[in-house]
Image (cartoon, grey):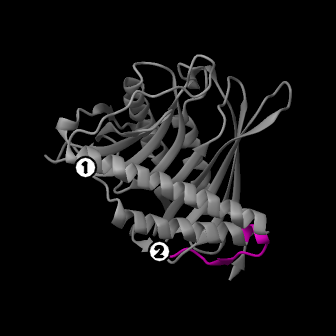
Amino acid sequence: MAPFNAFDQHYIRTPAYPWLLDESGFVRAGHVLKLIDICGSEAALRHLNSHGRKGLVVTASMDRTNFHAPIRLWDMIRLQSRVTQVWKHSMEVQVTVRAENFISGESRDVATAYLVFVALDAKTREKIGFPTFQALTPEEKRLAQAADMRKKNRVAEGKTAPFIPIEDRDNPVELTRLMTLNDANAQSNVFGGIILSLIDEVGSQVASRQVLGQPIVGVRQDRMSFIAPTFIGETVEAKAIITKTWNTSMEVQVEVYAQNPNYPEPRQVATSYQVYVRLGPNGRPGEVPPAIPVTDAHKQRADRADLRREIRQQEEAHEQALVISE
């Protein structure tokens, strides 16, 4: 088993340009998610190729992304990714995001994300295995244990709180985009970060509608799954609804479909849950108008949102306990 090495880590630094800001004056969460996917996939690809296996990596899911602080204009966005665990046909990568003020030198924690990747043969596109590795330091062992816990919870959650499809009667917010050359890699596959950005855009719209246009901020990208690839020339449609409102936050469910012009039926390519917080006049969390469940499906979604929230809290408490025990 090969130990961790420098190839299992990757770094990105890029400025926060004016055109990346949202209505609140902060960098859009969708742009940060796009960078997270790029940085994470680079670490996964380096781990695969540096251990003698040649192939491609594709994003299978983004397990959890917590946003701790906003990124302001001209901050330097710094991302670091590293391998946390490898299973038979998949691997988890942690990506941390920090913002650096180029004048004061102040650096602050912005987000932490966990992504799962699978490896494909470059020619056949069949799944191949990742090289194994051994966690050596106490921190590496803690990260590997936490990754195993998230995988276990992912499987359990799929059974106890399965995804309930969005219907037209749910009155979803919809967003449609044509995928172009700028959105894809050399194999004509649309980058996962493009889909993540689209998910945040439509999620922000439905959250903004719920708070009647008041400022909102994304605080969590939750249980995002890629189901199928998307290609150049296809039209992508994202649908979003509110599943649950709490005091100052709300969960949004998003489904993404791709329509190939040569086929009559669209196919589902991704699903996701987002959590947004309303910002009050002082920039602190403000009250969210409640979404009252009406149908049985609405009530089931609300109950499952509470379950997901409880699972996240348990995950975070367990990770904190692992840190303390080091």
Residue 319 in which image quadrant: bottom right
Q: State the image coordinates of residue 103 (x, y, percent, origin top left).
A: 84, 24
Q: State the image coordinates of residue 234 (x, y, percent, origin top left).
A: 29, 41
Q: Earlier in the sequence, mark 2 or mark 1?
A: 2
Residue at label 1? 165
Give the magenta-colored segment's residue range: 128-140
Residue 323 in which image quadrant: bottom right
Q: CA distance from mark 2 to mark 1?
A: 31 Å
> Mark 2 against mark 1, which lies toward the viewer?
1
Q: Give the side of residue 152 with respect to residue 243, left or right.
A: right
Q: Is residue 132 magenta?
A: yes
At label 1, the amino acid type is: Pro
Please identify the quadrant where the N terminus is shown. Answer: bottom right
At label 2, the amino acid type is: Ile
Res 19 label: none
Label 2: few (<14), some (14–19) or many (≥20) C-alpha neighbours in 10 Å: many
Of 19 and 84, the residue lying toward us: 84
Residue 270 in view of the camera: no
Q: In this picture, is 15 found above or below 183? A: above
Res 128 label: 2
Of 120 and 29, the residue lying toward us: 29
Secondary element under disc 1, as helix, strand or loop, is: loop
Secondary element under disc 2, as helix, strand or loop, is: strand
